[in-house]
Image (spheres, helix red, strand yellow):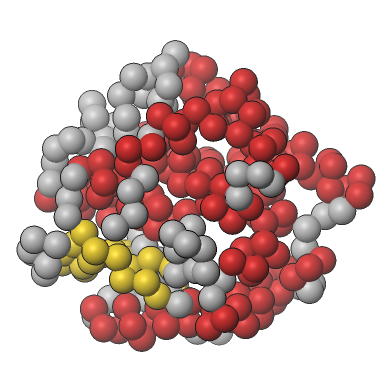
Amino acid sequence: MTIILYDSSSALPQKAFAPNTWKTRFCLNYKGLPYKTEWVEFESIGIDVYKKLGLPPSAHSPDGTPSYFLPVIHDTATGVSTSDSFAIAEYLEKTYPSPSLFPNDTSVFQSTVDDTVRDAGIKSLAQFILADIYLILNPESKEYFKRTREAAFGKALEDIAPKAEEGVAQWAAVKAGWDTVDSWYVKSGGPFVLGTTISWADFSVASWLIWARSVWGEENQRWKDIATWNNGRWGKVLNDLREYQKID
């Protein structure tokens, strides 16, 4: 039995950087499931993954244009193909229940975690990191990434990150968002969202952190800021989950 994990490629030595796919990679590693990564360039996702596996598009734009997002898995043992990181986690939990991603019937609570992390800490951070993501992509994906992000933000890629005083204020907003996420850990009293128990929520948080660390590198000041915020919480979260960061 092998699970095929479809992930976005990059020019980084380890290739893996995409946060949503990291959520699935964490789950597979945590459950000890054998898997193999198929690396995909952005514009190939629709044909090489979705159409190949017979999956419907992830979404449609107002003009009807389909969009295709990773992660996607194909389980060779069951023949099931699934997209969306939370839906994949639910499938893995049902099919391979131990160890649990949603201990103590917490799946409903955990289903809200990723949206909360995105709203609190990621939407404001994204503007700072997009131009640097472009730099770590393979040539095959650079034009697509630049074109689609510039269309989304309505400005040149290099102009998306706020600068000068606005940049300082917006970076403070990123910190405030992560303060909100930190409050969950403070309330739990442990190193994880559920106290001393690892769950999908921790993998969700850690995946966004790995995204930033992978794109910026550990010596980048932005990453150093994040790693030391909240009394070093975010560097510690990644360290506590390091055994589940294997890349096949």
Q: Is residue 51 left or right of residue 80?
A: right
Q: Is residue 15 in view?
A: yes
Q: Residue 36 lies in what quarter of the image?
A: bottom left
Q: Residue 239 lies in what quarter of the image?
A: top left
Q: Is residue 200 in view?
A: no
- Residue closest to the eye, 240 or 128: 240
- Residue closest to the eye, 195 or 40: 40
Q: Position of residue 160 (x, y in %)?
A: 77, 63
For the point 60% across and 44% down, the residue is: 218
For the point 37% across and 19% down, the residue is: 195
Q: Residue 219 lies in what quarter of the image?
A: top right
How many marks the image carries: the answer is 0
Position of the N terminus by quadrant: bottom left
Q: Is residue 90 left or right of residue 214?
A: left
Q: Position of residue 81 (x, y in %)?
A: 21, 68
Q: Position of residue 183 (x, y in %)?
A: 55, 23
Find the residue positioned furthest to the right: 165
For the point 24% across and 78% down, the residue is: 53
Position of the C terminus by quadrant: bottom left
- Residue closest to the eye, 12 or 122: 12
Q: Position of residue 71 (x, y in %)?
A: 36, 63
Is 74 drawn above or below residue 123 in the view shown? below
